[in-house]
Image (cartoon, rainbow, N blue to C red):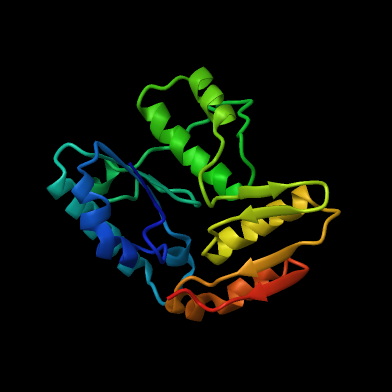
């Protein structure tokens, strides 16, 4: 199971709210947790509060799913020696080992990041480098993730469920890179009132990567 960036709001708070249904209820053998970027950038969340939330998350999972292996990923270095003894089994130290010449069958940085997570879990389960390369090259994407509905010389229509500012920016940057000579028009429906309230500045910045924006009502 890949439990990536929490649920909905991408924070540990959301993870705690949805833990029973989205993780514990599935009784997985391995859980992959990608530490939410909102937690790391929100000044209202102290490091003490963040650590306490993760301790609660890890304690709940290990208590409810005997023998589960938890792998955590973050976009900053993890100090293994400074970690609490109870958390060290959940940490993996990054090595210099690399799987080179990987070609992903779909564009967009979000897909690249998700592919890295999927490859990590597969590697831990014994999948070889050659098997990973072949799988990544053949991956055709999923519905509503940079999903092409129309491709022609005159017009290209892409559906992307980019409901977080970082995802939206990554998607639009990829569109601009692929179609640098085309006019980029975005029809955007914000997802959830609370997320729109909390990140409207970030959404505006992300949408600035389009030449024209059609904004529709917020999806509640």
Image quadrant in which the C terminus is located:
bottom left
Percent coordinates x, y for residue 180 in the rendering? 82, 53
Q: Considering depth in this image, is 9 or 74 the residue closer to the camera?
A: 9
Residue 65 at least partly seen: yes
Percent coordinates x, y for residue 72 in the rendering? 37, 46
Percent coordinates x, y for residue 38 in the rendering? 46, 66
Image quadrant in which the N terminus is located:
top left
Q: Residue at x 49, y 68 (%)?
A: 41
State the image quarter where residue 6 is shown. Answer: bottom left
Q: Is residue 209 above or below residue 139?
A: below
Q: Is residue 73 above or below residue 216?
A: above
**Left/right of residue 131 with respect to residue 83 in the rendered view:** right
Q: Residue at x 37, y 22 (%)?
A: 126
**Left/right of residue 102 with respect to residue 30 in the rendered view:** right
Q: Considering depth in this image, is 40 or 133 the residue closer to the camera?
A: 133
Q: Residue at x 24, y 36 (%)?
A: 29
Q: Residue at x 50, y 25 (%)?
A: 132
**Left/right of residue 63 with respect to residue 194 in the rendered view:** left
Percent coordinates x, y for residue 170 in the rendering? 63, 56
């Amino acid at each position: 199971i890949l439990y990536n960036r929490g649920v909905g709001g991408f924070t540990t708070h959301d993870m705690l709210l949805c833990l029973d249904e989205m993780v514990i209820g599935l009784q997985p053998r391995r859980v992959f947790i990608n530490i939410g970027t909102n937690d790391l950038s929100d000044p209202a969340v102290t490091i003490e509060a963040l650590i306490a939330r993760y301790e609660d998350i890890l304690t709940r999972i290990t208590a409810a799913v005997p023998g589960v292996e938890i792998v955590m990923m973050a976009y900053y270095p993890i100090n293994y020696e400074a970690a609490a003894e109870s958390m060290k089994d959940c940490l993996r130290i990054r090595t210099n080992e690399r799987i080179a010449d990987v070609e992903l069958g779909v564009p967009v940085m979000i897909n690249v990041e998700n592919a890295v997570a999927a490859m990590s879990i597969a590697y831990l389960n014994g999948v070889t480098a050659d098997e990973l390369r072949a799988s990544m090259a053949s991956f055709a994407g999923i519905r509503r993730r940079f999903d092409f509905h129309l491709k022609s010389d005159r017009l290209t229509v892409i559906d992307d469920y980019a409901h977080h500012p970082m995802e939206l920016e990554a998607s639009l940057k990829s569109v601009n890179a692929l179609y640098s000579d085309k006019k980029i028009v975005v029809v955007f429906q914000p997802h959830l009132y609370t997320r729109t309230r909390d990140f409207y500045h970030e959404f505006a910045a992300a949408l600035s990567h389009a030449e024209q924006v059609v904004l529709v009502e917020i999806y509640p």
